[in-house]
Image: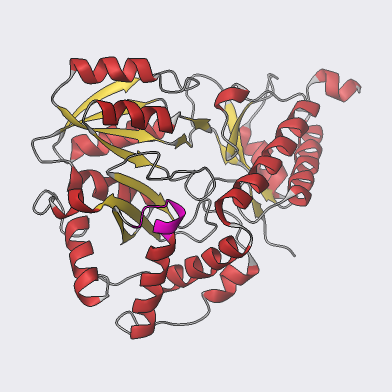
Amino acid sequence: MREPVLLTPGPLTTSLATKTAMLRDWGSWDTAFNQLSASVCSDLLAIADAGDSHVCVPLQGSGTFAVEAAIGTLLPRDGTLLVLVNGAYGERMARLTEVMGRRVVRLTFADHQAVCPRRLAAALAAHPECSHVGVIHCETSTGLLNPLEQIAGVVAAAGRALIIDSMSAFGALPVLARQVPFAALVSSANKCLEGVPGMAFVLAERQALLASAANSHSLALDLHDQYVYLQRSGQWRFTPPTHVLAGLRAALDQYLAAGGQPARLARYQANAARLRDGLRRLGLRSYLAEDVQAPIIFTVHAPPLPGYRFAALYQAVRARGFILYPGKLTSCETFRIGCIGALDGAEIDQALAALAAALDELGYLPAAEVAA
């Protein structure tokens, strides 16, 4: 039987070539593995057109590990981070900064509203103590896209440094360092690059990183030390996720051969349009307005029917070969459907058919759809 298709924002469905690349064992101190690391870092910098001004620091662990590492390394111990919060991951950024013992100012928006650049400018004027600003590029808890280029312009004009969590956006949505000035951009292997979980990376402004020695609260999450050691030896400081990196190398090879960022975005946009239209045909409403919806993951209002349970819908769709994602909202009942990964229109159509059959089986189809 075919393995389930993951309609999630990562981990996600990967290609056979990516899976196959992980069948080989690598020596973590071997020259061949060092060359693999260097090639991956070089390509990641090239995607952001950041090779002259920035460096790539790979890190073991999930994306959240790298967000904590970036903030803990680049934000001075007596610094204050202004966090732009319009979802669960913005709140997570603020919370992990507080856990480190650093000061945080939250600028909060509703979870269906993008960050307002005018409010950001006012907040920076009111809080001169904030040396850095943290933002979620695509807020994965809803699929909301924040206006990154405008945000970066406001932050730069105010003379502050920007830390971008681009976990579920980098590789598909464009982020060019020449147009979007940033001190750090954080992402991971298992999102739009279509690798597997286990490593993340930070594209850090070179001079800011070199000036950050002794900032970090953590031995393992010290990006400065990780970078210096990597430059000196070609090796990671601690045991690297060798198979994960090999998978990412294969995923990047496929990414570049297919046309890189523009082609990846075009495929995801086509998937998103197909998914959005199919959900409408089923009588299901997207949570976000189209002008703030990223082509990454959709938050969908649950059918407004008595007795609805997401767990039942999840199992019925899974039995048909597709895995949904639960909602993260507390204000209303939702679930999420991703359209990224090694998927195209055929898988989206199959997923919509599976969802329709599951809704029908459970009696969750809106009345108008049932009558039709």
Point out residue 158 in the picture as x, y percentages from the top left corner.
Answer: 23, 25
Question: Any magenta on residue 47?
Answer: yes
In front here: 333 or 349?
A: 349
Question: Any magenta on residue 137?
Answer: no
With 87 as the anchor, is 285 left or right in this view?
right
In front here: 29 or 311?
A: 29
Residue range corresponding to the magenta coloring? 44-51
Q: Residue at x 17, y 62 (%)?
A: 225
Give the vertical position of 28 relative to 225 (above or below). below
Q: Which residue is drawn at 60% across and 38% down?
A: 295
Point out residue 356 in the picture as x, y percentages from the top left corner.
Answer: 79, 36
Point out residue 121 in the picture as x, y percentages from the top left corner.
Answer: 29, 18
In front here: 55 or 324?
A: 55
> Is residue 323 among the parts visible in the rendering?
no
Q: Which residue lies furthest to the right in this view?
A: 372
In front here: 161 or 27?
A: 161
Number of marks drawn: 0
Q: Which residue is drawn at 41% across and 61% down?
A: 198
